[in-house]
Image (cartoon, helix red, strand yellow):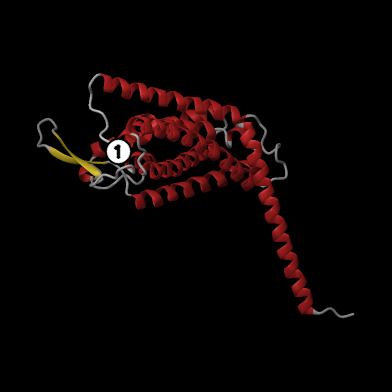
């Protein structure tokens, strides 16, 4: 009996479609299971980080209340008051939580020699996606809790909450994912979770913050006329500045060097919203791509 070529072609196409659907369902199931497992696995870590956020909030309240008691100028409006909390130590909190949740995301497999034992039939990409989503959700929950605390104290003192706080919270979520992506990239190169956390904190807190100063001293960019788009932490400034975007986005300072004429230099306060959106997106894309490629390479080599 002769077969019908057109019928065979239709059946082959239907087979491929069914196979793709099964593959998609399997991938979504693997990601869902990984998210569920990681949420339970990191619950204690989440509670510890949450306590750290509460501690820093209480510290901020004590500092501002003490300053007010001493007669120092207080915030003129609710937006400025919220901005004070975000400028105090909030950037450091994002780095700490990013390092805590992302430090072990890949390195732990090799430190404890677990590799892929927990999910032996799962694809590497699905595991990494599931872990990223789960840990980002925990990180976002900490950020939300902190913003609720700040909004509450602001409502008590000013009887209002600035609407721009929602804009700031959105940028905080976006920037925190960039920090998590950076720590994940570091984790893909490390074999020790502790070293990943230490290196992540040192690079973001010390190295990134030193780059603008070194560039200014070297004179590479005359008068610092160009924003530091290549420095990841520069984008974090929009979290607080988005409460009331400054115009212009830079300040001009006059520096008097020994035996030389005064020199005017620019200090960039924040990127623009468009610049921050695309800059952070580029960072996230590159960092996660490197992390995934490194993850696959380490798995194939059995490191």
- The answer to which image quadrant residue 46 occupies is top right
Left or right side of 53 for 75: left
User: What residue sits 50% from the left and 30% below the top?
Assistant: 197
- The answer to which image quadrant residue 254 occupies is top left
Q: Residues within 10 Å of mark 1 (few under 14, many from 20)?
A: some
The percent coordinates of residue 139 (x first, y second) are 51, 36
Left or right side of 301 for 90: left
The percent coordinates of residue 183 (x first, y second) are 49, 37
The answer to whether one can see residue 231 in this image is no
The answer to whether one can see residue 227 in this image is yes
Q: How many marks?
A: 1
User: What residue sits 39% from the left and 45% below the top?
Assistant: 167
> Mark 1 highlights which residue?
212
Among all residues in the image, which is located at the extreme front?
159
The percent coordinates of residue 239 (x first, y second) are 37, 40
Q: Nearer the viewer, residue 3 or 92?
A: 92
Left or right side of 253 for 300: right
User: What residue sits 33% from the left and 35% below the top?
Assistant: 83
Quadrant containing the N terminus is: bottom right
């Amino acid at each position: 009996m002769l077969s019908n070529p057109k019928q065979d072609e239709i059946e082959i196409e239907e087979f491929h479609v069914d196979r793709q659907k099964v593959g998609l369902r399997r991938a979504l199931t693997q990601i869902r299971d990984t998210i569920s497992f990681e949420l339970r696995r990191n619950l204690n870590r989440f509670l510890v980080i949450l306590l750290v956020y509460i501690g820093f909030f209480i510290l901020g309240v004590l500092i501002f209340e003490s300053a007010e008691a001493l007669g120092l100028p207080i915030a003129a409006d609710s937006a400025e008051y919220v901005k004070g909390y975000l400028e105090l130590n909030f950037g450091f909190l994002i780095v700490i939580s990013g390092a805590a949740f992302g430090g072990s995301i890949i390195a732990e497999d090799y430190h404890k020699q677990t590799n892929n034992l927990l999910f032996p039939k799962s694809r590497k990409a699905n595991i990494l996606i599931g872990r990223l989503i789960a840990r980002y959700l925990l990180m976002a929950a900490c950020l939300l809790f902190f913003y609720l605390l700040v909004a509450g104290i602001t409502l008590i003192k000013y009887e209002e909450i600035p609407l721009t706080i929602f804009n700031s919270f959105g940028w905080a979520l976006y920037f925190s994912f960039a920090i998590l992506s950076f720590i994940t990239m570091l984790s893909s190169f490390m074999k020790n979770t502790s070293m990943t956390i230490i290196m992540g904190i040192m690079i973001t807190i010390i190295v990134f913050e030193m780059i603008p100063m070194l560039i200014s001293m070297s004179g590479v960019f005359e008068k610092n006329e160009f924003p530091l788009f290549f420095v990841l932490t520069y984008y974090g400034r929009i979290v607080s500045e988005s409460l009331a975007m400054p115009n212009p986005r830079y300040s001009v300072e006059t520096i008097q060097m020994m035996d030389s004429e005064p020199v005017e230099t620019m200090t960039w306060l924040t990127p623009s919203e468009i610049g921050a959106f695309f800059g952070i997106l580029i960072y996230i894309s590159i960092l996660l791509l490197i992390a995934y490629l490194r993850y696959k390479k380490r798995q194939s080599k059995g490191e």
